[in-house]
């Protein structure tokens, strides 16, 4: 019985190793196609076979209604930083305020927007938990009288360290806007809702730019997946 069990386990291990080897040898486009199918099957509603519209946004809205524990409601905390001290994360966007160089904004691929008012010596996270944290780009309106306006784009298609083949993307939810110098942010409804299958037009925003030569209206340009929008 023991010999049969060992033989069965080794056969299973060999089969799994062969499957992994075949997966690693697949062409890149075929790997991405299989990943898309896997994500769709993982996220779809079993009753309908479809992924519900704006399900991620609905999930974040629901999370804000959950009750917190007594510990999390405490007014004071006593924490001491224990490390690690050498991990900065992946910052995709950094900009200083043209009207006040001591104010600096930085955005991480999975960490949201952070703001410093002392030249980067100390930082405060300004994006809320219900806002998308996958920051890919950041831009300030540099025209006179409009410098309190900022925009950040979300979603990264390059993949990350969670995937050997760079296929684990951070999908986004369009563009967010601030009118108070980056202290608070609001999603631009015109940039669409979250599409977890990355088929939406605003799932990935690669870069943003503002036409500072326009004295009146704000012309914002966004580079999305293969398209530049205005």
Image (tube, grey):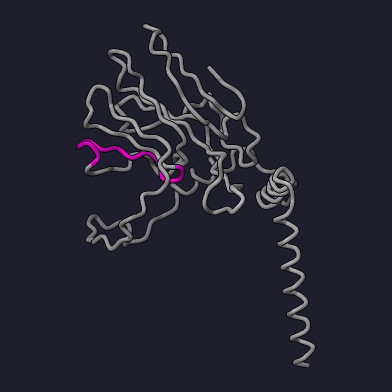
Residue 129 placement (x, y as % from top left): 41, 45
Work out which residue is located at the far front of the displayed protein and give it.
25
Residue 121 magenta-highlighted:
no
Which of the 4 image quadrants contains residue 198? Answer: top right
Which residue is drawn at the image coordinates 51% and 26% (left, top)?
A: 189
Q: What residue is drawn where x is 77% and y is 91%?
A: 3
**Rendered position, 165 above or below 219:** below
Displayed quadrant of residue 78: bottom left
Q: Of 58 and 219, which appears nearest the observer?
A: 219
In the picture, measured across the screen, residue 121 lies left or right of residue 195, that is left
- The number of numbered discs placed on residues in the rendered structure image is 0
The residue that appears at 28% across and 63% down in the rendered structure is: 82
At horizontal 73% and vertical 68% (from top left) the residue drawn is: 16
In this view, which residue lies farthest toward the bottom? Answer: 1
35 vs 29, nearest the viewer: 29
Q: Which of 156 and 51 lies nearest the eye of the viewer?
A: 156
Is 114 in the magenta? Answer: yes
Seen in the image, is 197 located left or right of residue 131? right
Residue 107 rendering spot, x and y as whole percentages: 39, 38
Could you tell me which quadrant the N terminus lies in?
bottom right
Q: Which residues are magenta?
A: 109-120
Horizontally, is 144 left or right of 204 in the view? left
Percent position (x, y) of residue 207? Answer: 49, 28
x and y, in percent, of residue 57 in the image? 53, 40
Check the image and report above or below for 27 versus 140: below
User: In the visual, does 102 lie left or right of 205?
Assistant: left
Q: Residue 129 or 139: which is nearer the viewer?
A: 139
């Amino acid at each position: 019985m023991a010999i049969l069990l060992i033989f069965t386990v080794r056969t299973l291990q060999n089969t799994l190793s062969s499957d992994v080897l075949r997966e690693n040898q697949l062409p890149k486009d075929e790997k991405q196609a299989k990943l898309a199918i896997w994500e769709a099957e993982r996220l779809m509603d079993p009753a309908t076979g479809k992924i519900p519209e704006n399900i991620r946004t609905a999930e974040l809205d629901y999370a804000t209604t959950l009750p917190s524990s007594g510990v999390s409601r405490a007014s004071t905390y006593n924490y001491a930083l224990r490390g690690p001290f050498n991990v900065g994360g992946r910052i995709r966007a950094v900009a200083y305020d043209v009207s006040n160089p001591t104010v600096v904004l930085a955005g991480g691929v999975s960490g949201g927007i952070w703001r410093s008012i002392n030249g980067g010596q100390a930082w405060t996270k300004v994006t809320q938990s219900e806002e998308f944290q996958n920051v890919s780009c950041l831009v300030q309106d540099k025209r006179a009288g409009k410098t309190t306006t900022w925009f950040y784009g979300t979603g990264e298609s390059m993949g990350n360290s969670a995937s050997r083949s760079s296929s684990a993307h951070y999908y986004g939810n369009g563009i967010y806007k601030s009118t108070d110098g980056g202290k608070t942010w609001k999603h631009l409804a015109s940039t669409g809702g979250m599409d977890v299958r990355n088929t939406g037009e605003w799932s990935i925003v690669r870069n943003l730019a503002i036409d500072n030569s326009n004295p009146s209206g704000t012309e914002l340009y966004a580079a999305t997946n293969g398209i530049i929008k205005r």
